[in-house]
Image (cartoon, grey):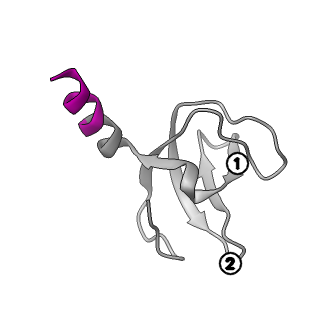
């Protein structure tokens, strides 16, 4: 998944299984909002106003891509 350095709108994303944040801790799977990607390459994602994580953008998947993949697998 490729992102621009600046994210103008908030994208709905999911984290892939076994995703770790910049401190090495596992990130809870679920729906997040992609807030930005900083100059060092970390993506800032937020679950809500209090829970945010910096993660590798390669560990993100757009929610609609995930839904499309699930529909394809079920066929």
Q: Quadrant of the C terminus?
A: top left
Circle 1: element type: strand
Q: Residue farthest to the right?
A: 23
Circle 2: element type: loop
User: Bounds of the magenta span?
Assistant: 68-75
Relative image position of residue 68 (x, y in whole percent): 24, 38
Neighbour tally class for label 1: few under 14, some 14-19, many 20 plus, Cα within 10 Å: many
User: Closest to the observer: 62 or 16?
Assistant: 16
14 shown above or below 7: above
Q: Is residue 26 magenta?
A: no
Question: Can you tell which quarter of the image residue 49 is in?
Answer: top right
Q: Earlier in the sequence, mark 1 or mark 2?
A: 2
Neighbour tally class for label 2: few under 14, some 14-19, many 20 plus, Cα within 10 Å: few
Q: Name the residue carrying label 1.
A: 53
Q: Is residue 31 left or right of residue 49?
A: left
Q: Residue farthest to the left?
A: 75
- The residue sitting at 25% across, 27% down in the picture is 73
68 shown above or below 7: above
Q: Quadrant of the N terminus?
A: bottom left
- The residue sitting at 59% across, 39% down in the picture is 47
Marks 1 and 2, how far apart at CA: 16 Å
Relative image position of residue 21 (x, y in whole percent): 74, 47
Question: Can you tell which quarter of the image residue 57 is in?
Answer: bottom right
64 shown above or below 42: above
Residue 39: numbered disc: 2
Relative image position of residue 16 (x, y in whole percent): 54, 39
Question: Can you tell which quarter of the image residue 26 is in?
Answer: top right
- The residue sitting at 48% across, 70% down in the picture is 7
Relative image position of residue 53 (x, y in whole percent): 70, 48
Magenta stretch: dominant secondary structure? helix
Image marks 1 and 2: residues in contact by CB distance under 8 Å:
no
């Amino acid at each position: 998944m490729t992102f621009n350095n600046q994210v103008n709108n908030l994208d709905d994303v999911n984290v892939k299984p076994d995703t770790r944040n910049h401190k090495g801790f596992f990130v809870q799977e679920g729906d997040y909002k992609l807030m930005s990607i900083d100059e060092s390459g970390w993506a800032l994602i937020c679950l809500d106003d209090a829970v945010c994580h910096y993660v590798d953008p390669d560990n993100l998947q757009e929610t609609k891509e995930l839904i499309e993949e699930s529909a394809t697998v079920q066929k």
